[in-house]
Structure formats: structure tokens, C-alpha cells
Amino acid sequence: MSTPPAPPHAELIDRPFSFYPPISGVENNEWRLREATWSEMMVRNTQEDLEIAIPRQYFGGISETDKPVMIVGLTQELEYKTGAVWPMKRKVYSMPVAPMSRPPGPKAVADPSEPTGLGAIMGTGAMGNESRIGKMIMVTFFSVVTLGLMIWALVKFTPDAKPTFVAKDQGYLELNREDDYFGIVRKLGQPSADRFKPESGELQYRLLEYKDRGYAVILMGTKQEDVRYIGTMGLGPDGKGWAPLHSIDYAKGANTMGILRTMPKF
């Protein structure tokens, strides 16, 4: 019986090396030779506290250079488990069996009278679907027409809203056509502004503004000293308005509202 050759331990003494392929189950692949016999070689991992005895039959050749590291070939891929190395067995997965296909033949033609899709689930046929769709279209049409008529009637018959100017008080209701400047001041107090309308022609117009009350009192006459009360103009909440709030009747029955409506602000 022939004796197996001595393991190549001389080249590995005091030199780090790596196995190829790496031993599965060990993260670090840098080793040093610890001990060698004719049947196995004891190696130690340089970063893990791990010593493994590898049968000599799994050792192959050694690389000719150690740059960057010496490589020791393995004749079989090994796996470390339960404290020893074993030949690695890879799992073989079987491919799933393809389902049996339908034998070739003429394709069945669907009967158009039979219900399909949602109609088959609800138990209605093609004619039933068409009838329901027609009803939905009619209901939608009449709903739109009815809504349009309601909007038209609302716009047509709703009276136009007219702005209403409300003063903070109604003290001007106590004024009459006989009140001159002094009579108005006795009833309402001193105005915040007092001015005549410039270039008014034959008729003179005087404005007494009560800004805190929200209105202005208008006086009219042929002379500035003879002007009398003819009405009140609302100034609005921001003081920029100009709309009649009160008017008076003349002795002959005429009313001053027409004059106030056409009077520009001054």
C-alpha cells in the first residue's frame, strides 16, 4: 500500500493564506497553519477563535505568489457546521409542472343572447341592460331640464335687490322745510363740516355733514342766508356714500326727492 504524499505545509508555515473556494459558514477567509499530519491539516482563523481540521484529500494546489495573499485551492466546496467541515450539498429545486393545456380545437362561439359579465351576475340579459341604460338617460335628461327651469324662474321672478342706506340715528326725521341753519343745529348739534356747493347758479345749496351720524343735511335757497332744509343724504358706513334718506314736500305738493337723486356730491 502506497503512502500518501506529505501535505504542502512547508510553504504555509508562518504565512497567512485564504481558501478557494471559501469555506461556507465562516465569515473571515484568512487562515494560518497550526499543525499538519499525513491525514489532515489543522488551520486557525486569524480573526475568529476558530480551529478546523481539514482532511488532506480536500487540499489542492497552492498559488505561486502570495501577493496580495497566498491562495490554497480546495478540491471541493466545504461547509463548516457542528464544529467540523463537510462537503457542501446544494439544494436542488424542482421546477413546477405546467398546467395541462386545453387540446387544440375550434373555439366555442359565445351566444349573443346569453348574459355576460355583470348581466350574468345580476341575472339580466343584453336587452335588460339596454332598457336600464335608456331609463337612466331619460331620468338624467329630465332632471337637468327641471333644474334649468328652476334656476331660470329664480332669476326671472326674484325682484332686484336695492341697496338700503341706514344711518346711525334718525334725528333728521325731526327736520322740516322751515328749518334753517340755526334750527338744524338746535335739533342735531354742530355739524362736523359745513360748506356751500360751488358754482351752483341761481340756487344755493348748503351741506351740513354729521359724519358720526352717517349722513349730511342739505339746505337750498336763492340766497345763502335764506337756505332752508330740503332733505338728508346718507353717507354709508365708510362715509363715501351718497344716497337720499329723507325728503320734504313743498307748499304746492312737490317733493324734493327728485332734486336729491340728481344732486352730485359736493
Image: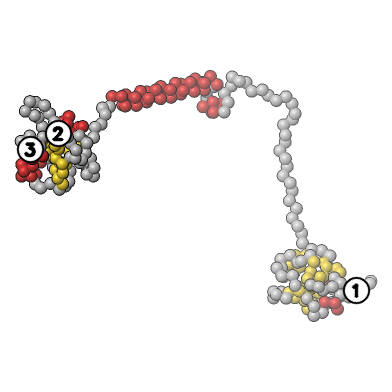
Residue 119 versus residue 5 in the image, above or below:
above
Dot 2: within a 10 Å radius of its alpha carbon, few (fewer than 14), some, or many (20 or more) residues?
few
Query: Which image quadrant is residue 23 in?
Result: bottom right
Task: Identify residue for label 2.
Answer: 202
Kind of residue indicated by mark 3: Asp
Task: Identify residue for label 3.
Answer: 226
Q: Which of marks 3 and 2 is nearer the N terminus?
A: 2
Task: Identify residue for label 1.
Answer: 5
Kind of residue indicated by mark 1: Pro
Query: Which image quadrant is residue 239 in?
Result: top left
> Could you tell me how far apart the alpha carbons at marks 1 and 3 are, in whole angstroms?
147 Å
Front-lying residue, 45 or 56: 45
- Residue 100, image x, y percentages: 72, 36
Q: Which residue lies furthest to the bottom in this view?
A: 14
Tell me the mark number nearer the camera, choosing from 3 and 2. 2
Front-lying residue, 99 or 258: 258
